[in-house]
Image (cartoon, rainbow, N blue to C red):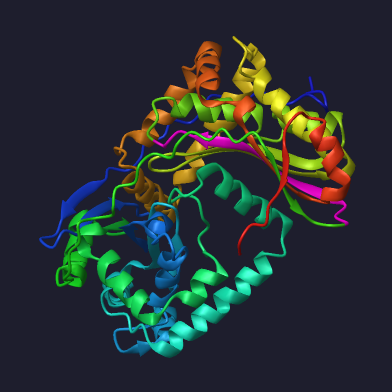
């Protein structure tokens, strides 16, 4: 008998994850090495992870770590930026730089036969960057333009306002690009000094994944990086951010805006929290997927948004919980009220029924294995292990741990990690129209101007 047209397919069991074995070593100068074989295609991904990230920025120079990372491939090892790009292109490769809150990662993918040649170029970039005045001026001007452009985005304004409100003066309280004022005050000597102290071998981990054996990977890394000199005391330790309890509604005024950007949340736990699996499953039910409570409420029931999502941004020593959405302007106060109500509702004892819990688990576990299909994905996964000091069995445990969670586990996690009464609300919208409805929520309404 044919399956009825509108019946959803039965969800099958999750595919277990068997993360590749990760071999470890360390060079005499302190460079840590991680390698895993993945020979599905004759390619290799190399990632170099340096501790620090934006949280290592000096308090008066937000964005400096990202600026320096961007300067590294503007010229190195006797090649200018164009020659460096051409050299990588001849190997079928391209260098990416990503600065996060806790680390900066340089990565490239190349054919296995070009592995050592690509490593040599990467070694030039991190050990012998030119850091020339003309490159510095050009990169700084480009970043000024990006900041000016970004400052026109309501979403970016809401994001900046939220980070600053929740983290305050904590090193997590600013974005990757920093501010125009900090950029204009930064000198080339400061950038060079930062590179000297932050880009040292004892703060670096080289990750190699692909069609090479660990022995081959380590031999190549030793050839490329054993001569790297310099040392530091390591990335300065960062204290956990204080719990945020700013109940105000902070408004970035956008006169005439037909929509409002909303950010609602507070500080959250670090990645190493024992409740990690319960929290990501809880979030899947609350706002982490299309069929979650918040999205169904605002999009399907009320018809005031195209989409709403929530997430835990778990960093090395802390993080945030937030709900992000954009709603029509006249529904702003209603949206804030409903988001806070949904957060409070999921904190109730046994708030999740069996079907909702099963659906949340399935959304996480059924496709989890696809995150580890390519050498690049595996290298990124190992870089995350390094970033958060997690063991190699982390990914293998994910599916069975999530599958074993109960509704009680999620309730306890929600009650400890979600604080709707203390949540900060940031709105980018038309303050003149919004002030009255927002004040009716019983919270102080304050205008802010995020710095770009």
Question: Is residue 362 visible from the viewing direction of this image?
Answer: no
Q: Measured along the vertical axis of the image, is residue 10 above or below residue 437? A: above
Residue extending farthest left: 28
Question: Is residue 391 visible from the viewing direction of this image?
Answer: yes
Q: What stretch is highlighted in magenta?
A: 256-271
Q: Where is residue 261 in the image (x, y as percent from the top left)?
A: 75, 48
Which corner quadrant holds the N terminus?
top right
Left/right placement of residue 363 relative to residue 102 reads: right
**370 or 281: nearer the eye?**
281
Q: How many marks?
A: 0
Quarter where residue 7 is shown: top right
Residue shown at the point (10%, 61%) measured from the top left? 28
**223 or 65: nearer the eye?**
65
Q: Where is residue 452 in the image (x, y as percent from the top left)?
A: 61, 64
267 magenta-colored: yes
Residue shown at the point (55%, 32%) measured from the top left? 364
Residue shown at the point (29%, 37%) measured from the top left? 391
225 magenta-colored: no
Q: Measured along the vertical axis of the image, is residue 447 above or below residue 341? A: below
Q: Where is residue 247 in the image (x, y as percent from the top left)?
A: 64, 33
**335 or 46: nearer the eye?**
335
Left/right placement of residue 28 relative to residue 303 reads: left
Q: Position of residue 159 (x, y in %)?
A: 63, 51
Left/right placement of residue 92 relative to residue 303 reads: left
Secondary structure mostly taken by the magenta-highlighted segment of the chain: strand
Quarter where residue 361 is shown: top right
Residue shown at the point (38%, 29%) measured from the top left? 397
């Amino acid at each position: 008998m044919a399956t009825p047209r509108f019946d959803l397919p039965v969800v099958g069991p999750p595919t277990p994850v068997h993360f590749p074995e990760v071999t470890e070593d360390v060079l005499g100068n302190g460079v840590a090495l991680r390698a895993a074989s993945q020979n599905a295609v004759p390619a290799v991904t190399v990632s170099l992870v340096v501790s620090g990230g934006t949280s290592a920025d000096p308090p008066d120079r937000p964005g400096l770590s990202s600026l320096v990372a961007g300067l590294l491939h503007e010229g190195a090892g006797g090649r200018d930026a164009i020659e460096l790009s051409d050299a990588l292109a001849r190997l079928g490769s391209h260098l990416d730089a990503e600065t996060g809150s806790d680390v900066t990662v340089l990565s490239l993918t190349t054919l296995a036969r070009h592995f050592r040649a690509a490593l040599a170029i990467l070694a030039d970039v991190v050990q012998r960057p030119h850091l020339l005045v003309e490159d510095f001026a050009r990169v700084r001007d480009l970043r000024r333009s990006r900041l000016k452009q970004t400052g026109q985005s309501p979403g970016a304004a809401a994001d900046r306002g939220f980070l600053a409100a929740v983290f305050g003066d904590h090193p997590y309280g600013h974005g990757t690009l920093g501010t125009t004022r900090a950029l204009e005050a930064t000198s080339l000597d400061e950038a060079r000094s930062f590179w000297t102290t932050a880009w040292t071998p004892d703060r670096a981990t080289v990750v190699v994944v692909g069609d090479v054996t660990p022995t081959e990977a380590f031999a190549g890394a030793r050839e490329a990086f054993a001569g790297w000199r310099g040392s530091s005391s390591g990335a300065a330790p960062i204290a956990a951010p204080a719990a945020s309890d700013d109940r105000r509604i902070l408004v970035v005024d956008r006169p005439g805006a037909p929509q409002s950007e909303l950010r609602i949340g507070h500080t959250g736990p670090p990645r190493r929290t024992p409740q990690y699996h319960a929290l990501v499953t809880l979030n899947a039910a609350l706002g982490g997927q299309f069929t979650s409570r918040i999205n169904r409420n605002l999009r399907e029931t009320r018809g005031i948004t195209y989409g709403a999502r929530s997430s835990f941004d778990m960093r090395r020593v802390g993080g945030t919980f937030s709900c992000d959405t954009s709603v029509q302007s006249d529904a702003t106060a209603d949206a804030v009220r409903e988001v806070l109500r949904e957060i409070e509702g999921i904190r109730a004892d046994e708030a999740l029924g069996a079907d909702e819990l099963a659906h949340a688990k399935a959304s996480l576990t059924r496709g989890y294995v696809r995150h580890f299909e390519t050498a690049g994905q595996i290298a990124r996964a190992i870089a995350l292990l390094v970033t958060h000091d997690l063991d190699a069995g982390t990914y293998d445990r994910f599916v069975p741990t999530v599958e074993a969670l109960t509704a009680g586990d999620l309730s306890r996690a929600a009650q400890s990690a979600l604080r709707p009464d203390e949540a900060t609300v940031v709105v980018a919208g038309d303050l003149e129209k919004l002030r009255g409805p927002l004040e009716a929520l019983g919270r102080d309404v304050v205008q802010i101007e995020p710095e770009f």
